Image (cartoon, helix red, strand yellow):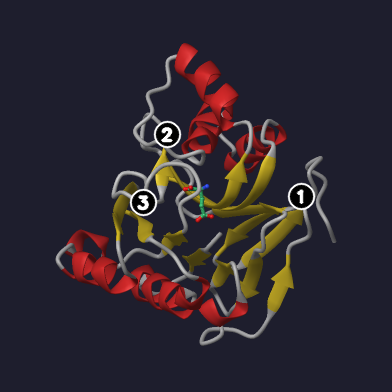
Amino acid sequence: MCGIVGYIGNKDAMPVLLDGLKQLEYRGYDSAGVAVLIKGKIRIAKRSGKIKDLVAMAENRSELDNANLGIGHSRWATHGAPTNINAHPHQDCMANIALVHNGIIENFSTLKEKLIEEGHKFKSQTDTEVIAHLIEEYYKGDLKDAVLKALKELEGSFALGVISSNEPEKLVCARKESPLIIGIGEDENFIASDVPAILKHTKKVIYLDDGEIGVLTKDSVRVFDSSGAEKN
Ligand code: GLU
């Protein structure tokens, strides 16, 4: 179980994500990746190896610059070898959704079989990819609602960061038995698996409880329980 960082605000997301991942390196990992949303499109850079290899990869990809929303991940493989394809973020069939996950989905093979029968095409050998396809299956115009429904099907542990090109001003996160925090800034908000990833930007932190889901925009943070009821 490794690291997650996410950003929504007015700044260029890539430096925030890459620096956040560097601050989480102490947790150990075998691969790393980012997804950013620019002009309505999700763009991904990911690979096995070190964060510095991902940084080098990103330096040659100017189309990743100037996003205001993104998620980053460092992976410690549990299901599927530490390959470029298995690195996170993972996507749905239409590539409208990108997500990062720490933890283990115990019932992924049953879910994967069902989703394949329903016509979903898988690219990786990870347990994580089922979550992207489940969210796609449940998506009816509200990312939070689709994530809530998908989570009900999962057995195991997760910390999640999810973005969708259909909702370019939203970052959704959730956790169960895997750590995840929300960082609150001025006209910007963050998610991270641990405080060091976002400490340069804010000291105001919300610790998500088990089963909770967070919806971040650049100027709001809302937290819901697993039934969808909003917490005050
Ligand atoms: N189980 C997932 C995978 O193997 C996530 C591992 C992690 O927590 O980094 O890709």
Amino acid type at image mark 2: Asp
For this rendering, which residue is in front, 52 or 148? 52
Quadrant occupied by the N terminus? bottom right
Q: How crowded is mark 1: few (under 14 residues within 10 Å), some or many (20 or more)?
A: some
Q: Which sits earlier in the primary sequence, circle 3 or circle 1? A: 3
Q: Residues within 10 Å of mark 3 (few under 14, many from 20)?
A: many
Residue at (37% x, 24% y) in the render = 121
For this rendering, which residue is in front, 10 or 98? 98
Residue at (51% x, 33% y) in the render = 130
Q: Relative to 108, is 119 above or below?
A: above
Amino acid type at image mark 3: Pro
Residue at (41% x, 77% y) in the render = 22
Quadrant occupied by the C terminus? bottom right
**Gap between marks 3 and 1, in whole Å?**
28 Å
Give yes or no for contact between labels 3 and 2 (Cβ–Cβ under 8 Å): no
Query: Could you say where residue 145 lies in the image, as x and y percent from the top left?
Result: 66, 37
Q: Mark 3 points at which residue?
A: 82
The disc label shown at residue 92, or none: 2
Is residue 198 visible in the rendered image? The answer is: no
Residue at (81% x, 51% y) in the render = 230
Q: Residues within 10 Å of mark 2 (few under 14, many from 20)?
A: many
Q: Relative to 230, is 112 above or below?
A: above
> Position of 138 compared to 52: left or right?
right
Secondary structure beneath dot 1 equals loop
Give yes or no for contact between labels 3 and 1 (Cβ–Cβ under 8 Å): no
Residue found farthest to the top: 117
Q: Mark 1 points at which residue?
A: 211
Q: Relative to 183, is 199 above or below?
A: below
**Gap between marks 3 and 2, in whole Å?**
20 Å
